[in-house]
Image (cartoon, rainbow, N blue to C red):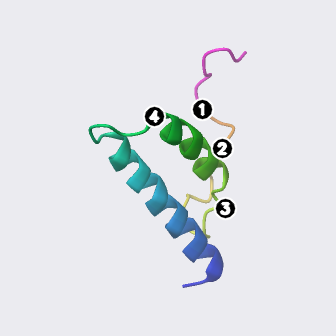
Amino acid sequence: MCPHCEDFARTVVMLGQLALYAETLGADQDFIDCMGPSLAASLPEPPPGTLPADYDPTDGPEHPGEG
């Protein structure tokens, strides 16, 4: 696996583990609130072929507060 692919896969796994931890009784919400956005922001560009060739990240519905 290429180093770029490995970093992406590892970060996605950590986000999944954080999501599972968030559902446990007594989970530290401050930790979750800090680490979730940090992990998401650290995601590298997805490996080639992960997204369709015509994928446009700016295309989609407006989010609250936009527009």
Gap in angstroms between the C-alphas marked 1 and 3? 21 Å
Residue bearing mark 2: 57
Residue bearing mark 4: 29
Asked whether residue 55 appears in the rendered view, the answer is no
Majority secondary structure in the magenta region: loop
Q: Position of residue 37 (x, y in %)?
A: 60, 42
Kindly check if marks 4 and 3 are in contact, taking CB atoms under 8 A apart as contact. Answer: no
Q: Secondary structure at mark 3?
A: loop
Q: Position of residue 16 (x, y in %)?
A: 41, 54
Residue bearing mark 3: 44
Kindly check if marks 2 and 1 are in contact, taking CB atoms under 8 A apart as contact. Answer: yes
Gap in angstroms between the C-alphas marked 4 and 1? 30 Å
Nearest to viewer (mark 4 / mark 3)? 4
Would residue 61 be counted in the magenta stretch?
A: yes
Please name the residue shown 57% across and 66% down the image. Answer: 8
Amino acid type assigned to the residue bearing label 3 in the image = Pro
Residue bearing mark 1: 60
Q: Earlier in the sequence, mark 2 or mark 4?
A: 4
Amino acid type assigned to the residue bearing label 1 in the image = Gly
Nearest to viewer (mark 4 / mark 1)? 4
Q: Position of residue 66 (x, y in %)?
A: 70, 18
Amino acid type assigned to the residue bearing label 2 in the image = Pro
Gap in angstroms between the C-alphas marked 3 and 2? 14 Å
Check the image and name the residue furthest to the left.
Answer: 25
